[in-house]
Image: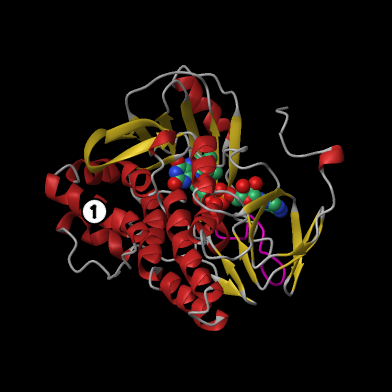
Amino acid sequence: MPLRATKRGAARTPLSGDADVLICGASFGGLAVARELRGSGARVLVLDRYDVGERQTSACGIPTSWLDALDLRRSLRQTFDELVVHTPHADVRYPLPWSFSTFDYRTLCEDLYAQGDAEFETATVTGRAGETVVTDRGELRAPLIVDALGWRRVLGAGANVQPPEAFLSRGLEVHPGGTGDDLEIWIDRSYIRAGYGWSFPADGELRIGIGSFDPRDHVREPTVQLASDLDADAVRYQGNWIPHKLRPPVQDGVGFVGDSAGHCLPLTAEGIRPALYFGVALGRELRAIVEGRATRNAALARYAGFHAAHLWHFTWMLRVQNLIPRLPPRLLGAGLRSMRARGVLDWAFGHYLEICHPRIVAGETPTLTAPARAPAELSGLASGPRR
Ligand SMILES: Cc1cc2nc3c(=O)[nH]c(=O)nc-3n(C[C@H](O)[C@H](O)[C@H](O)COP(=O)(O)OP(=O)(O)OC[C@H]3O[C@@H](n4cnc5c(N)ncnc54)[C@H](O)[C@@H]3O)c2cc1C
């Protein structure tokens, strides 16, 4: 059992008081919000049950341009210009129009935190009553509260929907030592009925895992199997539930960001850059409030509108997520092979990056529109089944 560095015993003193902005959750979403509030003059307090960067929450793969946009290159472990997809009937190597990188979680979180001027305390958040957040160390009050606590959405109103009924996928991975040159994906029912497997090398470590779109399907056994097939040890487990449907971004005056708002992209389960992207957007709105440029209602309504502008893209990706497990494996293999054409690849990956593009960091407000024309090879996917 790994020993967590969370403050214990005498160091776990009671906590109370007021802040201008209380950010619950110190991972991608919460730290991006805090970064945007730097120099605003507000007292910003970030809470997490673990120290910053202490507990890795993903395979830590991201488009490299996001690391550059946020000046987080120090955390970069390994960069990939290609994606390799394995199916029972085809192995396809896609040259990517933009690169993907794995990074070190602790370094990224520490550097992102250092870009803000928020205070930090370890505390487990258990609930909220109005402007009071209840933690295991005491109660804290703030007029502006952010839930960046992940899929549990601890500060949401009412009873939270729990798996397996909730719109959640599940993911589990192991982190053996080892090296590799390829970013690899497996879409293969012999591993998982609906979902995919992955191996993300990270300079001396492999992050090998299985994600299931169906929360009822277990992922431990297939994860062990994939690791074994890759001659890797199933050690150092890391897993969690992953939302695959958007949830309300504002509720009862609280802003939700990242997994707590369902910002993880369906189909790929890429949730880091959406958490950063929506974190930047929410942080800017909170900054407008504390600087007196907007009322709380107006700013949070603008954030809700920004979130809603992405609904079409998230819905489209959820349809593809639901469709792919239903395709006969031979047809899937043929479809993946047909995507090798340069024009199709650039179109598909270009639009994919556009959904949560890092240009938001430089202050550009994305103008999201539904793609006007899909290449013929992809047009059938857009009308997949709903769930
Ligand atoms: C196995 C696996 C692999 C993945 N790989 C990738 C990947 O390679 N790339 C990618 O883009 N996405 C990946 N994802 C998805 C990604 O991890 C999430 O979408 C992303 O972490 C969401 O960021 P977040 O900041 O919203 O929440 P989280 O990263 O989940 O952070 C939530 C924070 O809140 C804290 N917290 C939770 N509850 C409490 C509480 N009650 N009190 C105090 N603190 C609390 C946690 O300690 C944590 O720091 C993966 C997911 C899984 C499960």
- The image shows residue 246 at horizontal and vertical percentages of 50, 65
Whether residue 198 is visible: no
Query: Cβ of disc 1 within 8 Å of ligand 1?
Result: no
Quarter location, residue 371: bottom left
Q: What's the amino acid at mark 1?
A: Gly
For this rendering, which residue is in front, 5 or 355? 5
Q: From the top left corner, tell me how far across and down residue 94 is, in percent.
A: 23, 38
Q: Seen in the image, is 5 located left or right of residue 248?
A: right
| Part of the protein shown in magenta | 156-167
Question: Image check: 325 left or right of 83?
Answer: right
What quarter of the picture does the N terminus occupy?
A: top right
Q: Closer to the camera, 57 or 49? A: 49
Classify mark 1: helix, strand or loop: helix
- Residue 305 in the image, given as x and y percentages of width and height: 44, 77
Crowd around label 1: few <14 · some 14–19 · many ≥20 (10 Å)? some
Along the viewing direction, whichever of 221 and 374 lies nearer the viewer: 374
Q: In the figure, is residue 294 to the left or right of 312?
A: right
At 42% across and 56% down in the image, what residue appears?
322
Judge whether residue 280 can be spotted in this image.
Answer: yes
175 inside magenta stretch: no
At 55% from the left and 27% from the top, the residue drawn is 224
Residue 366 spot, x, y in % from top left: 31, 66
Residue 161 lies in the magenta-colored region: yes
Observer-nearest of 295 and 223 = 295
Disc 1 target residue = 350
Magenta segment's dominant SS is loop
